[in-house]
Image (cartoon, coloured by chain):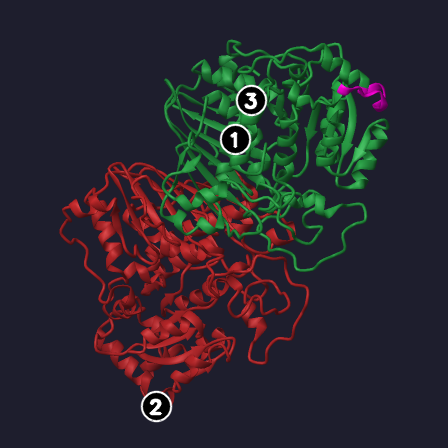
Chain colours: A green, B red
């Protein structure tokens, strides 16, 4: 981490580890000292392999693990034994667990790093516990389920000096860098408006990724034998199992997911954050289709206002989901795809659609911006290198992902059903440093949530 | 044609066909040169097509006149109105009614579902009957254009049922805009909470076509209810109240409310025909998207410059979507469930539904400081509540009613162009109003002019 002193390389910890890896029985007295007491994560030489534990190893988690296979996938943890079995086939030597709390306690000495790809509501407890134990953490986006959690986790990661990376893999791409460099080159002048949209929860114009705008199901089908439902719920309030939540459809539910915004916001706001050097917004407001206390709405528009930053003018950022889009700019040639998701930057000297100036003739005339940013070795690789003492990864929690996730998740505050009536009268005024809404105090209760007993970190 | 002549003619007719001794009383009204000016003291003979629901309300407002014939495809739905006017003849099929009562009626109120406005109103116009037709004027742009032209050709007095157009507030808005109260306006936002307003009349179905085929109620002639629309089995999810949500019958939230909410800026800013329109919607299931209007939509219109007035971008939001909070709206002040904001160079104007209800310059400070211009427009007696009577007046004195088809037609075309854009979502459509053609999307033609079922024509 940029702001952290590198933990000292200790011969002792290396020995400790080797001992443990060799045989548990070989444990000598000093190995009983917990890793984090020793002052941070174990230093792993670039030539050595990290021992990685995966928490949530089906779906996206499985994909993340494949990106980390240059290292030793040492432990697998999942609340669904089907998924665990699937991952075990690929990593037969890895130990398996259902409960990440137990896994982290048991494997503390055997792992250097943790990959977290649970549903959103478990990101924080799993990542926070790992960070506190001095483990490097790769956590899927959005970083957490609440604004408070994002800030707390980022601060904890800074303090622990662990290497972190949020799973917004697009940040490592070439296009993102070109967007920043083009904007910084002044190609579109001062940017006053940004529009970001996704089709989700819809899938294209005739499909659906997961439902939103639904009521809680009333039937109580039996829990599949392979699933530990109580563990799946984790910190969330208890409710009976239903296939409407697991697998995958949890994204639409307030208790578990963070909606279309949480799913895609961290991907698509990321480049805009970097290009425009955004920080906390000063206001946020939203409109949406009918919303209840169970699920996110079918569609929403969320508008953030960012203040002037250095020599940069204030910016209004509009987020659209569920099929809503900004108006198609005239500069975009007829017939050119407007996309199911995208980004439009409106500057006083031009517009960018994604990482390209529009119309395309302008991009052609412009060519390439001067390179100002280092290119990435790959998103997961960034983290691996950081874990081994390299520089912080591009979407590490303390310097980037924590703030980005806070701002993304703040948007969901503006569509909270309980605030809806009041929000027809005011925008939410946000004091980012103090982490509070200043003009509607009751909104602040939604910045964090209660955890079920046994799940407090 | 002299008034004298017509009056005699009419009186004879009023006595009853049997008693009409003189030859000239059999000369059809139209041959006598269309409607001239009717004596102010004389009563109109009014018929209604679609007598339940909103039709009933319109008819009651015209009860100063003779309600001579009532038509409805559903006796039950119209029962209240039928009972109120025991002397009126009752019909199910407006075509039969017009054939039988042609000589006995001067004017007709059309308050059917949207999909039968045009066939009913056109049949009346061609018989030179004055027409009061509910909003939106018709179900397709082509129908609207034909009605507007026919009303002009046959010189009948017309009124579209956007009663807010008779309000005092819409006239205030017009006068303030003329006065330059907020400077040139380039941006307008209009919104409605429908199709999920939360009331029986403002919640429309969003669903696939039902598969079950419940029996048709005894009181309903389903085939007549369908009128020009291709056949499908009866279901209570269409009739009598839920048709607004279905493509084939209604025109959705925008069609329902646009003629109220977009009306004030359309008039005050003389918007005329848009040149471009583009819609986003929440539809994602093909079987739903092909049948009903979406849960929510955003429709963006562009209007070209008009004289000294700059081009305008007008955005429509429904399904509880809203514009970003207007820059000139004070914190704490509510953005209503239905309304419009006109963003001017020097301030904004906000109003609610139905004829610029509650129109104010915002912020309020600016409203208070505003030195209001003198009244330039005449007011309609009783405002919105006098909308029907304004039409009665027009039928009698020959001066157009407040929202005659000359005005209501183009307003409805604009609204329906947005409805059409929802069917072709995410495509910016270039609109050639004069030729009634979307110039960059051939698929649009079938929505501009949908086909009628055999046996039905305009």
Instruction: Specify whether residue A25 is painted magenta.
Output: yes
Q: Is residue B271 above or below residue A156?
A: below
Q: Are marks 3 and 2 in contact (CB under 8 Å)?
A: no
Q: Which residue is mark 1?
A: A151
Mark seen at residue B19: 2
Instruction: Specify whether residue A310 is painted magenta.
Output: no
Q: Nearer the viewer, residue A310 or A234?
A: A234
Chain that bears disc 3: A
Same subunit: marks 1 and 2: no
Q: In the rendering, at what x and y percent does residue A153 appear?
A: 57, 30
Quadrant assignment, res B357: bottom left
> Which residues fall within the magenta stretch?
A20-29
Q: CA distance from mark 1 to mark 3?
A: 11 Å
Q: Nearer the viewer, residue B391 or A156?
A: A156
Among the two numbered marks 1 and 3 on one chain, the one whose residue lies closer to the N terminus: 1
Horizontal side of A355 relative to A96 (left or right) equals left
Q: Is residue B131 above or below residue A80?
A: below
Quadrant assignment, res A30: top right
Mark seen at residue A398: none
**Quick check: can you spot residue B160?**
yes
Q: In the rendering, at what x and y percent does residue B427 appear?
A: 53, 39
**Quick check: can you spot residue A334?**
no
Q: Secondary structure at mark 2?
A: helix
Q: Are marks 1 and 2 in contact (CB under 8 Å)?
A: no
Q: CA distance from mark 3 to mark 2?
A: 101 Å
Task: Report crowding for label 1: few under 14, some 14 to 19, many 20 or more residues within 10 A (C-alpha).
Answer: many
Mark seen at residue A158: 3
Q: CA distance from mark 1 to mark 2?
A: 91 Å
Q: Nearer the viewer, residue B446 or A194?
A: A194
Task: Report crowding for label 3: few under 14, some 14 to 19, many 20 or more residues within 10 A (C-alpha).
Answer: many
Q: In the rendering, at what x and y percent does residue B92 appear?
A: 50, 78
**Residue at 38 percent of width and 79 percent of height:** B103
């Amino acid at each position: 981490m940029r702001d952290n002193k590198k933990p000292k390389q200790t011969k002792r910890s290396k020995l400790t580890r080797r001992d443990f890896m060799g045989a548990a029985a070989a444990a000598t007295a000093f190995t009983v000292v917990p890793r984090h007491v020793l002052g941070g994560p174990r230093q792993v030489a670039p030539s050595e392999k990290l021992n990685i534990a995966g928490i949530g190893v089906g779906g996206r988690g499985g994909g993340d693990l494949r990106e980390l296979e240059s290292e030793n996938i040492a432990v697998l943890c999942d609340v669904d034994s089907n998924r665990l079995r699937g991952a075990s086939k690929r990593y037969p030597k890895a130990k398996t667990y259902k409960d990440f709390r137990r896994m982290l306690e048991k494997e503390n000495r055997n792992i250097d790093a943790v990959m977290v790809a649970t549903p959103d509501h478990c990101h924080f407890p799993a990542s926070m516990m790992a960070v506190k134990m001095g483990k490097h953490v790769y956590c899927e986006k959005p970083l957490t389920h609440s604004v408070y959690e994002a800030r707390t986790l980022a601060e904890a990661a800074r303090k622990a000096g662990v290497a972190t990376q949020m799973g917004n893999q697009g940040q490592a791409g070439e296009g993102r860098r070109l967007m920043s460099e083009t904007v910084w080159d002044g190609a579109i002048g001062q940017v006053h408006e940004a529009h970001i949209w996704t089709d989700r929860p819809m899938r294209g114009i005739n499909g659906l990724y997961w439902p939103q705008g639904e009521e809680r199901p009333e039937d109580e089908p039996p829990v599949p034998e392979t699933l530990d439902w109580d563990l799946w719920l984790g910190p969330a309030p208890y409710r009976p199992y239903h296939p409407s939540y697991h697998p995958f459809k949890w994204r639409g539910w307030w208790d578990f997911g963070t909606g279309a915004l949480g799913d895609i916001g961290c991907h698509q706001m990321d480049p805009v954050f970097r290009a425009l050097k955004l920080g906390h917004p000063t206001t946020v407001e939203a409109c949406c289709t009918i919303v209840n206390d169970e699920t996110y709405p079918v569609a929403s528009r969320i508008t953030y206002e960012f203040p002037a930053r250095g020599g940069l003018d204030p910016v209004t950022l509009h987020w659209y989901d569920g099929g809503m889009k900004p108006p198609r700019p005239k500069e975009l040639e007829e017939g050119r795809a407007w996309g199911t998701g995208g980004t439009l930057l409106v500057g006083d000297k031009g517009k960018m659609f994604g990482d390209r100036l529009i119309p395309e003739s302008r991009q052609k005339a412009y060519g390439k911006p001067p390179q100002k940013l280092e290119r990435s070795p790959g998103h997961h690789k960034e983290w691996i290198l950081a874990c081994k003492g390299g520089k912080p990864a591009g979407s590490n929690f303390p310097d980037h992902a924590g703030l980005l996730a806070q701002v993304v998740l703040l948007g969901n505050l503006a569509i909270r059903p309980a605030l809806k009536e009041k929000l027809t009268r005011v925008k939410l005024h946000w004091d980012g440093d103090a982490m509070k809404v200043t003009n509607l105090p009751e909104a602040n209760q939604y910045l964090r949530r209660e955890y079920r007993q046994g799940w407090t970190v | 044609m002299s008034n004298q002549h017509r009056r005699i003619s009419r009186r004879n007719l009023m006595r009853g066909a049997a008693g009409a001794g003189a030859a000239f009383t059999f000369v059809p009204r139209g041959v006598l040169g269309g409607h001239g000016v009717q004596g102010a003291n004389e009563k109109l003979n009014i018929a209604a097509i679609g007598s339940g629901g909103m039709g009933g309300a319109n008819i009651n407002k015209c009860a100063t006149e003779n309600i001579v014939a009532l038509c409805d495809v559903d006796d039950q739905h119209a029962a209240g109105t039928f009972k109120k006017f025991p002397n009126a003849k009752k019909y199910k099929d407006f075509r039969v009614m017009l054939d039988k009562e042609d000589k006995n009626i001067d004017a007709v109120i059309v308050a059917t579902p949207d999909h039968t406005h045009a066939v009913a109103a056109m049949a009346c116009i061609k018989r030179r009957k004055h027409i009061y037709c509910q909003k939106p004027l018709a179900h397709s742009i082509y129908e609207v254009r034909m009605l507007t032209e026919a009303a002009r050709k046959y010189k009948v007095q017309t009124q579209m049922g956007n009663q807010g157009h008779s309000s005092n507030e819409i006239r205030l808005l017009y006068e303030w805009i003329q006065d330059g109260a907020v400077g040139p306006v380039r941006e307008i936002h209009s919104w409605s909470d429908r199709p999920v307003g939360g009331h029986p009349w403002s919640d429309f179905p969003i669903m696939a076509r039902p598969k079950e085929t419940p029996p048709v109620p005894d009181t309903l002639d389903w085939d007549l209810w369908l009128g020009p629309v291709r056949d499908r089995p009866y279901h209570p999810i269409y009739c009598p109240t839920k048709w607004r949500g279905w493509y084939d019958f209604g025109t959705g939230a925008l069609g329902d409310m646009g003629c109220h909410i977009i009306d004030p800026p359309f008039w005050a800013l003389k918007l005329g025909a848009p040149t471009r329109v583009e819609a986003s919607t929440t539809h994602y299931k093909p079987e739903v998207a092909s049948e009903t209007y979406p849960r929510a939509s955003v429709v963006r219109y562009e209007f070209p410059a008009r004289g000294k007035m700059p081009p305008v971008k007008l955005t429509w939001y429904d399904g509880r979507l809203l514009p970003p909070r207007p820059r000139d709206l004070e914190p704490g002040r509510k953005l209503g469930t239905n309304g419009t904001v006109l963003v001017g160079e020097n301030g904004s104007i906000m109003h609610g539904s139905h004829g610029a209800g509650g129109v104010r310059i915002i912020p309020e400070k600016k409203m208070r400081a505003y030195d209001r211009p003198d009244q330039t427009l005449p007011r309609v007696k009783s405002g919105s509540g006098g909308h029907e009577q304004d039409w009665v007046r027009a039928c009698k004195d020959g001066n157009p009613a407040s929202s005659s088809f000359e005005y209501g037609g183009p307003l409805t075309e604009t609204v329906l162009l947005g409805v059409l854009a929802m069917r072709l979502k995410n495509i910016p459509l270039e609109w050639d109003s004069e030729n009634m053609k979307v110039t960059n999307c051939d698929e649009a033609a079938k929505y501009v002019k949908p086909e009628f079922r055999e046996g039905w024509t305009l």
